[in-house]
Image (cartoon, rainbow, N blue to C red):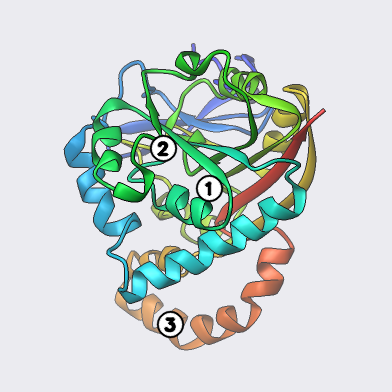
Amino acid sequence: MQYCRFCDDYTGVRFIFLKGGIAYFKCSNCGLIFTTSGTEHPLVNYDRAYYLRDTRRYFPEPGTPSYERMRRGWMKRIRRLKAHARGRRLLDVGCGTGMFISIALEEGFDAWGFEVQSAAEIAAQNSSIKGRIYTGESLECLKGETFNVLTMWGVLEHLDSPALILGGVGKLLNKGGIFALSTPNISSMNRWLFGTKWRFFIPSEHVIHFNKENLKKGLEQAGFRIVKINTVFSQPALREGLYSLNTVMRHIFMILAIPLLWLFRRPLEWIGLGDTLEIIAVLR
Ligand SMILES: [Zn+2]
């Protein structure tokens, strides 16, 4: 019997598909999609090699076009945080090699990071954020510390006890503190188009998948009020999805779909069909 990792219900949990040998389940009570592998028995070892591999993809070298593209994305998020935050003390949970922290520092935030040991070592090599990374197995090690802003970019989907995490975040925030997060959106257009082949169904790493409604509800139950919610379309998700189709379908799709989608990307994001959910919530 499978219990939902979010609402603990088991009556509505059903098997939906298998990917990479991992079973995916859906809870009809809360809408969560989850796998049977969790952080207790992680399939991926979040070690030094994992972060070094990710460094190339998510933390490119300064000065390169991908760095500049990524920087623009971070700046957009920082501008939103500035609009809502009442103070500048910020904690980035799951900070990886710390690119977001260095940009937040430049933008006037008193920014700190939290990471598991292996990644914290890599972040420590970044001189602009030296001494600003907390490390430990859980957020418990930050007990007693408080922040005005807590960010979790692409972290929640890696953890198997979301309700516990969302509850723990509140304890680290001052009253009126901001919680900002991003996570894949199972109600996205690319997920509907490509099904199990969707880029963000990564069986070894992503163990839980939210939609707008259940994440919103979870945050409200954890004492937050949602102030902004939007979705972001992923071009790589569309490209990867197309490559998973057969040749004929792929060509038809490429000729018709790409220009059309590019034109309608913003409206798609606006109606909530982007690949990533971005939420800003305030602690009540
Ligand atoms: Zn559920």
| Contact (Cβ within 8 Å) of mark 2 with mark 1 | yes
Q: Nearer the viewer, residue 83 or 201?
A: 83
Q: Please, what is the three-letter code of the amino acid marked with disc 2?
A: His
Q: Name the residue under label 2.
A: 206
How far apart in space, not on screen, are marks 2 and 1 (Cα)?
9 Å
Q: Position of residue 54 (x, y in %)?
A: 27, 50
Q: Nearer the viewer, residue 21 or 113?
A: 113
Q: Where is residue 139 in the image (x, y as percent from the top left)?
A: 48, 20
Q: Please, what is the three-letter code of the amino acid marked with disc 3?
A: Met
Q: Name the residue under label 3.
A: 254
Q: Name the residue under label 1.
A: 184
Q: What element carries label 1?
A: strand
Image point (48%, 44%), residue name:
154
Image point (58%, 14%), residue name:
144
Which of disc 3 and disc 2 is earlier in sequence? 2
How far apart in space, not on screen, are marks 2 and 3 (Cα)?
28 Å
Q: Position of residue 34 (x, y in %)?
A: 49, 30
Judge whether 255 appears above or below 186 on screen: below
How far apart in space, not on screen, are marks 1 and 3 (Cα)?
24 Å
Q: What element carries label 2?
A: loop
Judge whether 160 appears above or below 153 on screen: above
